[in-house]
Image (cartoon, rainbow, N blue to C red):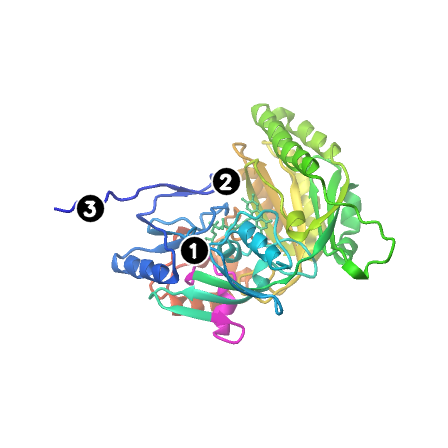
Amino acid sequence: MRTQPAPDRRVWRNWAGTATATPARWSRPRSEAEISAAVKDAAAAGLTVRALGSGHSFTAAAATSGVALDLSGWTGVTAADTGTGLVIARSGTTLRALNAELAGLGLAMANLGDIDVQTLAGALSTGTHGTGARLGGLATQVEALELVLADGSVTTCSASSRPELFSAARVGLGALGVISTVTLRCVPSFTLLADERPVPVDEVLEQFDELAAANDHFEFYWFPYGRQALVKRNNRLAGPDRAPGTRVPPALPAWRRFWEFEVMENAGFGALCRLGRARPRLIPALNRFSSAALSARTYTDASYRVFVTPRRVRFAESEYAVPRESLGHVIAELRRAVPRLADPVMFPVEVRVAAADDIWLSTGYGRESAYVAIHQYTGLPYQAYFDRFEAIVAEVAGRPHWGKLHSLDAGRLRSLYPRFDDFRRARAEVDPEGRFGNAYLARVLGSHDL
Ligand SMILES: Cc1cc2nc3c(=O)[nH]c(=O)nc-3n(C[C@H](O)[C@H](O)[C@H](O)COP(=O)(O)OP(=O)(O)OC[C@H]3O[C@@H](n4cnc5c(N)ncnc54)[C@H](O)[C@@H]3O)c2cc1C
């Protein structure tokens, strides 16, 4: 008699430790046919399905009590046209692996976020973005998507084929199907000149629009008890067009990269955070110390090495996109709110910018955005801080990052996204039974019935 294999009751946990789940089943497909078979098997067993990325969402976006689809065996670039820059990659490819493959082809993503450990599909599905007033989030770099739908069939969508599905699925929250492959519009490899320096935060706010307009990629960090911000400006080197005699700083030598990124920004900052967690009363002083210790550096490197930094100190995060013109109000309110919190804040606030886009559930839909991200060190209380932040950004119609902590539900989100019900209709059409549902989607998209 054949014995049944013991059910796999492994626990799924996200990077931040803010979400866990116990899937009924795990599946690790290695081909599109296997993804399709896993979806059909789930349907036959009456189970829901969620594709897993790298677990770097702070929300329970990927959590499932049904079938967890681990796509770590479905990776790599399958086609590339170096003339047009169009590249097809499998959905489980991490951004790190993708960047390396693209570099080998003389190509690059036009913009990236802060880290590269996410999977391509996971990053797209929650609206992951970097910074740059003339650039949208990662999803704006997508030319076409191939999706495995709830009935196991495979469909392709793009601006010319099933355009409504394309408008929904580029930032699709995993609600429409399993992304199988992504066609990206890449650009030729480029070098960035990175300039980072402390500037008084009031000055940054006064010059915010000019800084956003004058730099390809502009952002700033601000420790909420300090007066200084760390302003980061990353600009493309013009290559051969550069004026003769222009001094170009070199790449950081390996030892300095290690010292600054690993020792100072991870190990050193991590030690300060642990001290703050053990003695919370010291936090405002530690925070001011971190602010005063900010220093300048200028270097050049391949774009993806400048965009991305290692993040080893764990934290909880919330981030909202607000209309660009309301940033000053949001920062002023945060500045008033943080010193009044019962539990002090250890981590900096990060501010970035993005262009408007036309993707239905993109935080940048139809408006130029400033992104305000707040963080708290793991193990320190954050709820009152995040609640206060939500109340502030609610005044200016802030839209939450789908992968970062927030408490909004479908009722509120409908008022923030003009195409919200179009998204729900597109979902009802391709997934009438809610095969790809989970508790997070039930909250943010509402009941499956229209
Ligand atoms: C340290 C850190 C730094 C970060 N920096 C940034 C940043 O700079 N900018 C920014 O915008 N965000 C940032 N984020 C957030 C992060 O980019 C997003 O949460 C992203 O979704 C994580 O990707 P992932 O691969 O871990 O996906 P997961 O979190 O595992 O999944 C996210 C969603 O994608 C769905 N999904 C995954 N694969 C597929 C698929 N094949 N088909 C359909 N749906 C799928 C999942 O079901 C889930 O709903 C950061 C997060 C962390 C922890």
Relative image position of residue 164 (x, y in whole percent): 49, 72
Relative image position of residue 371 (x, y in whole percent): 64, 52
* Of marks 2 and 1, the one in the foreground: 1
> Is the CB atom of the residue marked by disc 2 within 8 angstroms of ligand 1's nearest atom?
yes
Which quadrant does the C terminus fall into?
bottom left
176 in magenta: yes
Earlier in the chain: of badge 1 and badge 3, it is 3
User: In terms of depth relative to the viewer, which is nearer, 313 or 35?
Assistant: 35
Are the residues tagged 1 and 3 within 8 Å (C-beta)?
no
Earlier in the chain: of badge 2 and badge 1, it is 2
The three-letter amino acid code for the residue at tag 3 is Gln
SS at mark 3 in the image: loop
Badge 1 crowding class, 10 Å Cα cut-off, few under 14, some 14 to 19, many 20 or more, is some
The three-letter amino acid code for the residue at tag 2 is Ala
Q: Is residue 113 visible?
A: yes
Q: Relative to residue 32, is residue 311 drawn left or right?
A: right
Q: CA distance from mark 3 to mark 2?
A: 35 Å
> Residue lying farthest right?
245
SS at mark 1 in the image: loop
Q: Which mark is residue 4?
A: 3
Q: CA distance from mark 2 to mark 1?
A: 24 Å
Badge 2 crowding class, 10 Å Cα cut-off, few under 14, some 14 to 19, many 20 or more, is some
Which residue does the numbered mark 1 point to in the structure image? 74
The three-letter amino acid code for the residue at tag 1 is Trp
Based on the displayed image, in which of its 4 quarters is residue 375 positioned? top right
Badge 3 crowding class, 10 Å Cα cut-off, few under 14, some 14 to 19, many 20 or more, is few
What span is in magenta?
157-178
Which residue does the numbered mark 2 point to in the structure image? 16
